[in-house]
Amino acid sequence: MLNKIYNFFKVVSLAKYSELEHQYNILRIEFDRLKMEYERLRNKPDEQAFKIEQLEKRIAQVERTNQLLMRGLGIDEFTRVLQEAEDKEKRRYKKNKSKGSEKTYE
């Protein structure tokens, strides 16, 4: 009689163990998939972040121009800052063109 009870609990516990092991394997596969997706996204150069960075730089330039206008530093200072910005853009364009690239960055 004790043997039958022991075998019954052994079968039930093995079934429960198998069920838990199956759930564990499913979770492990899901974890591995998420980990691989995270690594892929982390290692991939993010074009959106680059575009956002470029926009932030442009916004900073516009804010600086607005600050100069609001401060009323005078036409000479404002013209000098604008000329520096234009020269910088021309150098960037020439540099890109000399590399064989016809791309211009806005």
Image (tube, rainbow, N blue to C red):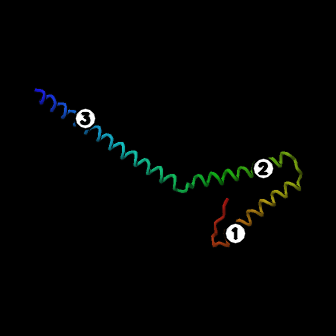
Q: Are marks 3 and 1 in contact (CB under 8 Å)?
A: no
The residue lying at 64 percent from left, 52 percent from top is 53
Decide which of 47, 11 is in the foreground and name it.
11
The residue lying at 83 percent from left, 45 percent from top is 70
- Going from N to C along the chain, the mark reached first, 1 or 2, is 2
**Location of residue 95 by image quarter:** bottom right
Identity, as a three-letter code, of the amino acid under mark 3? Lys
> What quarter of the picture does the N terminus occupy?
top left
Nearer mark to the viewer, of 3 and 1:
3
Residue on which disc 2 sits:
64
Residue on which disc 1 sits:
95
> Which residue is situated farthest in the top direction here?
1
Vertical relation: 26 (above or below) 49? above
How many C-alpha atoms fall within 10 Å of the one at disc 3: few (<14), some, or many (≥20)?
Answer: few
Relative to 2, is 26 on the left or the right?
right
Measure how far apart labels 3 and 1 are at the Cα level: 69 Å
Identity, as a three-letter code, of the amino acid under mark 1? Lys
How many C-alpha atoms fall within 10 Å of the one at disc 2: few (<14), some, or many (≥20)?
Answer: few
Q: Which mark is residue 16?
A: 3
> What quarter of the picture does the C terminus occupy?
bottom right
Relative to 20, is 68 on the left or the right?
right
Relative to 9, is 36 on the left or the right?
right
Judged from the image, the secondary structure of the residue bearing numbered disc 3 is helix
**Location of residue 54 by image quarter:** bottom right
